[in-house]
Amino acid sequence: MAGRSAPAAGRYKGRSAGERQAERRSRFLSAGLDLFGTAPGYRATKVIDLCKAAGLSTRQFYEEFTSLEDVLAELHLYVNDAAQRAVLAVVPEVRDLPLPERLTRMIHAYVQGAAADPRHARIAYVEVIGVSPRMDRQRLERRSVWIDFLIRNIDEAVARGEMPPGNYRIAAAAFIGAVNGLMHDWVVGWVDATLDDIAAELHQTLMGRYRISL
């Protein structure tokens, strides 16, 4: 995202301006992951706190970002992408398995990809809620990506004769909403469960709603 001023050009200690800028940006994002994903959290973090954690100046911060919300927005996409990569990595491995087994593997991959690092889970399910209309839009856009992914897998199951034809979009939206709700409650401590417990419960929920037999 565009900042307020451009960094200096030219090489310094053998590194180009672009390389130095990428390193600074990475340090800010890494510091944001720690501060937003643990204590004190996004709302209690100030720009000066992030700069101190990154070991950089406020001037350097504003060369990269216009606000802390920019950092949160980028981190939210980052943690969602990590979960998506985890799921997509298992898709080729499970393609020829029966539907219940495919769902089991993909749900476990999602839960591990989204929450094995507690910082990722807190940013994805807690810190982004109620921040701003912009963050609400981004959160819902990413949720729609997961709904579309689920629908594609349902369509594939229907084509294979594993499920009856039907309009499953409302059910898909309800399931993805349930995933987000359960993960939020787990992150804030309202649900006492392991990630395996959560994956198993989500699997049972999905199997029951779509009347998938073992």
Image (tube, rainbow, N blue to C red):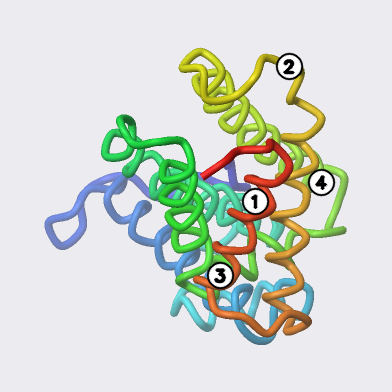
Of the image marks 1 and 3, the number of the one nearer the N terminus: 3
Q: Amino acid at mark 4?
A: Asp
- Residue matched to label 1: 73
Q: Residue under circle 2?
A: 166
Front position in the image: 64 or 41: 41
- Tag 4 secondary structure: helix
Q: Nearer the viewer, mark 2 or mark 4?
A: 2
Which is more toward the observer, 40 or 146? 146
Task: Find residue 131 and report its horizontal and vertical position in percent.
Answer: 83, 58
Q: Are marks 2 and 4 in contact (CB under 8 Å)?
A: no
Residue at label 3? 32
Q: CA distance from mark 4 to mark 3?
A: 19 Å
The single residue placed furthest to the left in the displayed view is 14
Q: Earlier in the sequence, mark 1 or mark 2?
A: 1
Q: Earlier in the sequence, mark 2 or mark 3?
A: 3
Secondary structure, mark 1, is: helix
Residue 161 placement (x, y as % from top left) = 51, 17
Please tell me whether mark 2 sits on a helix, a strand or a loop: loop
Q: Residue at x 50, y 82 (%)?
A: 53
Query: Where is residue 34 drawn, in percent x and y?
Result: 53, 77
Residue type at mark 3 is Gly
Q: How many other residues sit within 10 Å of disc 3, few (<14), some (14-19) or many (≥20)?
A: many
- Which sits earlier in the primary sequence, circle 4 or circle 1? 1
Marks 1 and 2 sit apart, C-alpha to C-alpha, by 36 Å
Q: Which mark is residue 136?
A: 4
Determine contact: label 1, label 2, CB under 8 Å. no
For the point 33% across and 59% down, which residue is it?
23
Q: Nearer the viewer, mark 4 or mark 3?
A: 4
| Residue type of the residue flagged with mark 1 | Ala
Q: Residue at x 50, y 71 (%)?
A: 196
